[in-house]
Amino acid sequence: MQKIILIIVLFTDIYCFGQNKIPEDYGYRHISYTYKNDVVDVLIKSKAGEEDVEKPIFFFCQGSLPQPLIKYDGDDIYGVFPFDPEILTEKFHLVIVGKPYIPITADIKTLHNSSLYLEADGNFPQEYSKRNLLDYYVNRNISVLKYLEKEKWISSSILVVAGHSEGSTVASKMALKTSKITHLIYASGNPMGRIMTMISQKRANDSFEDNISLAEEEFKYWEEVVKNKDDMDASQGDTNKASFEFSNPPILYLEKLKIPVLVTYGTKDWSAPFNDFMRVDFIRKKKLNFTFQPYVGAEHNFFPLNKNREPNYDIFNWDKVAEGWLNWLNSK
């Protein structure tokens, strides 16, 4: 039974560097921060030569799965961010936090399918699974922000938090829990929760001729999750507790926010109808602090889809999306 949604961000930009395999060799500052006795890896990307220039934080919450932030192949490194960070470093210091108990760097050849860092038995690392929970990420990230705000090169004028996919849920709950966040970017999230994305994916493959509803598998899975919502068995992927927390509808957090919020999504993403519903609902409720930016014909990672729902990987839209984020921030 599927317990995770395998949503992969395709890092298409590859940069060449030397043989050393530490974040500083790739232009990142690496801070090891301790949160509840856990070592937390924080990477910071600044404009070259302006590392000590006072600028606000742009905090990016990445999507799901245990992947190292820096994945290298010989002298090449896959992009840490899905977009070119130089688009935003003129105005911000970019911050991203690694997954718990997943190495910050790894040779791509040592990783499994989808660049996953797994144990020898093919399971997620136990210490990762224990912490792969919505509330852990939210509270950890807020703690990191409190730590960073003490640095002289951090401006407190604004604080932007952005999240993609699973990270959008983390970002939205962070914005609800701390008033220090001034702007939220909610990208490719499902405001009705993870389980609705899983059901939508299966619904798309239901066949009238076969008279079989593949989505029924997900309803049965959800019944099991709710029945055992604190179960931390990760042998089949995400734990029940993780699935339960990430399936709580983020719209419940978003509708309470008063800060400016930008919602971006591809209209061919599985979650698009739910973002469209949120847009309709918030228009009805006259929530003027929300801006919606759909990318027509694009999927979860903003690649265009053809009529057979096949992505065209030759058209990379992530930089266009990041530029749209910057334009929106400049307007606010």
Image (cartoon, grey):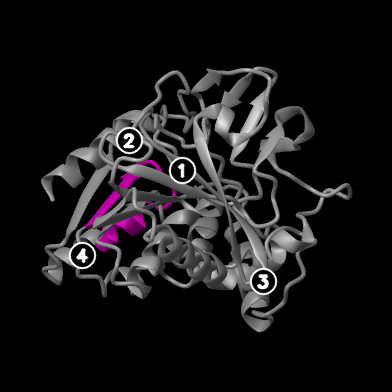
- Neighbor class of circle 3 (other Cα within 10 Å; few <14, some 14-19, many 20+) is many
Distance Cα–Cα, label 4 vs label 2: 23 Å
Q: Magenta residues?
A: 261-278
Q: Say which label, 4 or 2, has the lower sequence index.
A: 2
* Amino acid type shown at disc 4: Ile
Question: Which residue is label 2 attached to?
Answer: 89
Asked whether 159 or 308 is in front, the reply is 159
Question: Helix or strand or loop: what does disc 3 sit on?
Answer: helix
Distance Cα–Cα, label 4 vs label 1: 25 Å
Q: Say which label, 2 or 1, has the lower sequence index.
A: 1
Which quadrant of the view contains residue 147?
A: bottom left
* Amino acid type shown at disc 2: Thr
> Which-is-in-front pick, marks 4 and 1?
1
Question: Which residue is label 3 attached to?
Answer: 240
Q: Say which label, 3 or 2, has the lower sequence index.
A: 2
* Amino acid type shown at disc 3: Asn
Question: Which residue is label 1 attached to?
Answer: 44
Q: How far across and how far down the image is residue 128, in percent?
A: 70, 59
Asked whether 277 or 262 is in front, the reply is 262
Q: Say which label, 3 or 1, has the lower sequence index.
A: 1
Residue 103 higher or lower than 315, as above or below:
below
